[in-house]
Image (cartoon, rainbow, N blue to C red):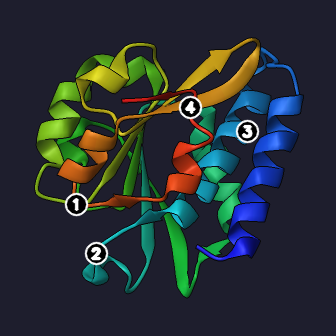
Amino acid sequence: MNRFYKLGLALIILVISSYSFISDDGTNAHIKATFIYNFTRYIEWPAEYKKGTFIIGVLGETRMWQELTTMKQKKSRGNQPFQITKFSSVNAVNKCHMIFVAESRSHELGLVVSKVKDFKTLIITEQSGLIEKGSGINFVINNNKQGFEINRSSIKEHGLSLSSNLVAFATVVK
């Protein structure tokens, strides 16, 4: 990873972590969406996933969908434009690079893991304890600040590679 990306991630993490967690779902969704877009820089997908549109799925009702949709207008992953897809049910989930499972759908994580097992999909959640149940990255609040946990084995099982630069900013690494 070049120095520009390392410096960029460090700056973003420092800025975001300097703000105390605000219970307003919109503010928190914006912070999480920023994290998600930055995760795309520090996780490598196989060659066949580096072509075409970079798809981020959202399962469940959450402000995250609106935040990601707004941000996609200004961002891309290299030469891949972002597409944000909202899934109304686990059965509707199909091939995507990342899937964010809203807290309201956390009880379906096992079904999501089964549904994407043949894809190279990063699963992102936001409820305590889900890092042990198949999530690759789980958002957590520590000391009133937004952070995230990483499950390296889950990420590796999905055929993805993780940068040590991202691991360094995680609150918990399993």
What amino acid is found at the position of numbered circle 2 in the picture?
Answer: Pro
Residue at the spot of label 1 = 159
- Foreground mark, 3 or 2, reads 2
Q: Earlier in the sequence, mark 3 or mark 2?
A: 3
Front residue of this view, candidates 61 and 9 = 9
What percent of the width, then of the height, locates residue 39?
Answer: 55, 55
C-alpha span from label 4 to label 2: 24 Å
Mark yes or no: residue 74 visible. no
| Residue type at numbered disc 3 | Ile
In whole angstroms, how far apart are the C-alphas of marks 2 and 1? 7 Å
Residue 116 lies, in percent from the top left, at 18, 49
Decide: is 53 above or below 125.
below
Residue, disc 2:
46
Pointer 2 and pointer 1: residues touching (CB < 8 Å)? yes
Mark with earlier residue (3, 1): 3
Residue drawn 62% across the image and 52% down it: 68
Nearer to us in this view, 74 or 131:
131
Q: Which residue is mark 4?
A: 148
126 left or right, relative to 27: left
Q: Residues within 10 Å of mark 3 (few under 14, many from 20)?
A: some
